[in-house]
Amino acid sequence: MQKNISLKVLPSEAANENLVKQYIASAEAVSLSAITGIIIQKQSIDARGKQVWINLSVTAFINEPFRQRELMKFNFKDVKNANKRVIIVGAGPAGLFASLYLIEKGIKPIILERGKDVRARRRDLALLNKEGEVNPESNYCFGEGGAGTYSDGKLYTRSTKRGDINRILNLFVHFGAEENILYEAHPHIGTNKLPQIITAMRKTIIDCGAEFHFEKKVVDLVKDNDKIVEVVTADGSAFNANAVILATGHSARDIFQLLNAKKILIESKPFALGVRVEHPQSLIDNVQYHCAVRSEFLPPASYNWVQQVDGKGVFSFCMCPGGIIAPAATSPGELVVNGWSPSKRNNPFANSGIVVTVEEKDMQPFKKYGPLAAMHFQRSIEEKAFGAGGGKFVAPAQRLVDFTNNKLSSSLPGCSYLPGIHSSLLKNVLPGFIHQSLQQAFKEYGKRMKGYLTNDAIVVATESRTSSPVRIPRNPATLQHLQIENLYPCGEGAGYAGGIVSAAMDGERVAKQIAASFACS
């Protein structure tokens, strides 16, 4: 017999499978030997009270042979000589998962990635961190795997209705991720492990006869009436196919400018902008787990919060326990910070983006840029931040309490941001409404999370790439662009996703729609 059972146990007990079996045996009034095995279906932490608990949902095998978890199987076909071909611009999660779905349907993807493969990207990231030199085509945002590859690999999403989350997670496991991502409430792979997984995906794509081209920056989309007939890259190469998926990510400003110049409809959209805040991980553990020292059976603690300040939403974004703040700029002269964690989340700091919603009314000085108004607003703040840091991607920073009191910090605490930090008044970097909203939100949240508002924490500017500042409108039914019938805007860069899993699901949705349209043609 197999039975689904819910348990609430101590962290140390959750780590002891034999003890979990004993609890099940007692609850079911059977002997321990009758429990032949268990499969964890869901696992989450409940830290609301003084005692931290682990909630487990398990399938118990009782008086029958135990069988391991059944993983999804995938049928990737040989598409080398397929009649139908799809150009995919961008090899982030949207582009990769669209490619894998098309291959399953016997359609050949041709992937054009402006950046380098994951191994070559490492060298460019090292140069950025150590020497303050950014490669505009190979950085934390651009390159194989997209922004997610070197910015943490968090797989949690609230977009539960946009696609088959379980299928996406199973694909990650198929390509090398650990099975715990299938049942943890907030699954996470880690920046140290994602490159191998992305490399395995690429190998399968190429082995199936698809094309994968690196350092192929798209510079033109050749139109004939209402279709794209050719995609041209910076080196003069030209590609054609039956459809084009545009999955370029939230930072491909040149693509937004190209679309605008070609009079292909785009829209300015609200986004969020703010700072990245870093605390000692031990402080966050102490606050969240209500203990002086975190148990070895608990992961480094995280947090998330939302605060309304005078009608403005202020919220945490991409919280990284045991993480590192990274320079995520894509061009010289602009400073952007993001965060990531290794799989063990074992660094001494915890960082999170804390951002404020930016709406159309906030961008009045940039209205002259039309649909690119939000993009230019975003860029202007990044340029200010770069100047305030003094160059070479040194970031302007303030202690947290000093930030709320408009006080220049006389010294700064240790920080994980490798290019370095420089004491600055961030009110001179951030727009007034963002700075004031953040100040008030930190004060309010400090009342709710005792110990959070401390000068042991540091505020680093600027966190500005939370989402795309541009939306590429598409038909909700066909997912095609509203004007171009074979152009499919996709993922974060098009304004339809907000993270690895939601981007992957959107890539699959678009690929599914294309496959259906090919079947009907």
Image (spheres, helix red, strand yellow):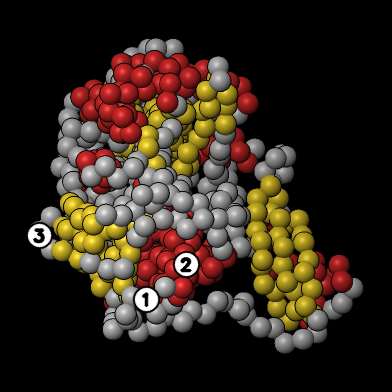
Q: Is residue 119 visible?
A: no
| Left or right of 169 in this view: 20 | right
**Amino acid on which the number 2 mark rests in the picture:** Lys
**Amino acid on which the number 1 mark rests in the picture:** Ile
Q: Which residue is mark 1?
A: 107
What label sits on residue 358 in the rendered view? none
Which residue is most to the front?
A: 225
Q: Nearer the viewer, residue 135 or 62?
A: 135
Q: Which residue is mark 3?
A: 236
* The C terminus - image quarter: bottom left
Which residue is most to the bottom?
A: 65
The residue drawn where x is 34% and y is 53% is 484
Residue 168, horizontal then vertical, whole percent: 50, 65
Which residue is most to the top?
A: 406
Under circle 2, the secondary element is helix
Under circle 3, the secondary element is loop
Q: Are marks 3 and 2 in contact (CB under 8 Å)?
A: no
**Amino acid on which the number 3 mark rests in the picture:** Gly
Per the model, the C-alpha gap separating discs 3 and 2 is 31 Å
Q: Is residue 326 above or below residue 298?
A: above
Instruction: Determine the image quadrant of residue 456.
Output: top left
> Which is more N-terminal, label 3 or label 1?
1
